[in-house]
Amino acid sequence: MKTTSAQKAGNKQAGLPKSAAAHAKKGAVIPAGQSAEKKKTVKPFLKWAGGKGQLLGEIRRYYPFSNGQITKYAEPFVGGGAVLFDILSRFSLQQIYISDRNPELINTYLMIRDNPSRLIELLSVLQREFLPLDTKGRKHYYTEKRMVFNELKTKGMDQENIKKAALMIFLNRTCFNGLFRVNQKGLFNVPMGSYQNPLICDEANLRAVSEKLQGVSIVCGDYRESADFIDAHTFVYLDPPYRPLSTTANFTTYTQTPFFDSDQQELRDFVNEMHRKGAKIAVSNSDPKNSDPKDDFFDNLYSTYYITRVQASRMINSNSKARGKIQELLISNFEPMP
């Protein structure tokens, strides 16, 4: 890949910050940077708009675990977790912290980690009831479950968290494009997709994911809450809501809180702060030059960082002609491997 801006990150790193593992639990037994002897590959349990599965080959160039100095991992915009699960499958680190502002998403991570058997039971029932139905029956069933999900979502009853997680996975596996979108009232409003035989209950992967998530700190909150966890031994991967390339490409409504240019600037300030702590940092975002070659928003915002443009496929857009190959940005405070 061609690096368009490869200026070394400025400002020499300040002294090591105090260890901040208030949110973290100890995880692995194999030294950081070494691949686990018995690898168990896990994959995302949700389809997720903007998921990084297609870019893992590029993102792996940024994994800084080879020298044993980086023993922690933080992903404050975890989403579907493609990078998280790739790292969990390939390395055993001492501490891992993930977070997201989407409470239903984080609830699902927690339920998979803490109560996988009951979750699998509920998903098995949903799969058994849904698959035999014809299209009309499926639409009715889907609409009914979406209504129940939104009711649980708005009432916020903790005792129903396992049911809400099961419905989250069911809706994700059967909705249009696996898109999680909410309206202004915070209600999930994606219509049913047209999948013939969706895998609603992937028991083997759910159990493997549950095992890998043991010891992982899972937090529902703003990315800035990860600051106490991050230190000079941490690799931080940030995959925020992308800056939209056009009005039809704006899919940042995964929560009721939008992400504007001012938020991108605040995120850059956070990156600067974590850089001064000595952390290794990589950031993903859209490349505005796809739609306007003169738009230097990110080139200016991250002018002291390495910026690499990589090819990706944009699969979700309300305008089908706007889908296809585009460039995305990978930004870091260190030079990636060749």
Image (tube, grey):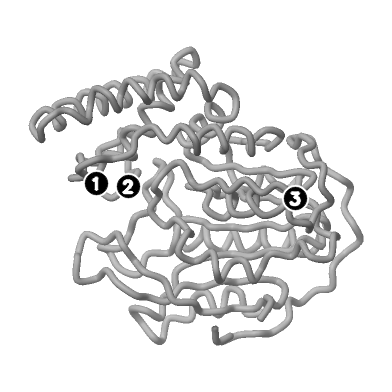
Helix, strand or loop for disc 3: loop
Q: Are marks 2 and 1 in contact (CB under 8 Å)?
A: yes
Q: Which residue is mark 2?
A: 179
Q: CA distance from mark 3 to mark 2?
A: 36 Å
Q: Are marks 3 and 2 in contact (CB under 8 Å)?
A: no
Residue closest to the eye, 30 or 110: 30
Q: Which residue is mark 1?
A: 176
Dot 3 or dot 2, earlier in sequence: 3
Amino acid on which the number 1 mark rests in the picture: Phe
Task: Specify the quadrant of the image occupied by residue 322.
Answer: bottom left
* Residue at the spot 58% in from the left edge and 33% down from the top edge: 210
Residue 151 lies, with reference to residue 251, above or below; the image says: above
* Residue at the spot 36% in from the left edge and 48% down from the top edge: 253
Helix, strand or loop for disc 2: loop
Q: Which residue is mark 3?
A: 37
Q: CA distance from mark 3 to mark 1?
A: 39 Å
* Residue at the spot 65% in from the left edge and 85% down from the top edge: 6
Say how many tags the image has.
3
Q: Does residue 119 show up?
A: yes
Quarter the N terminus occupies: bottom right
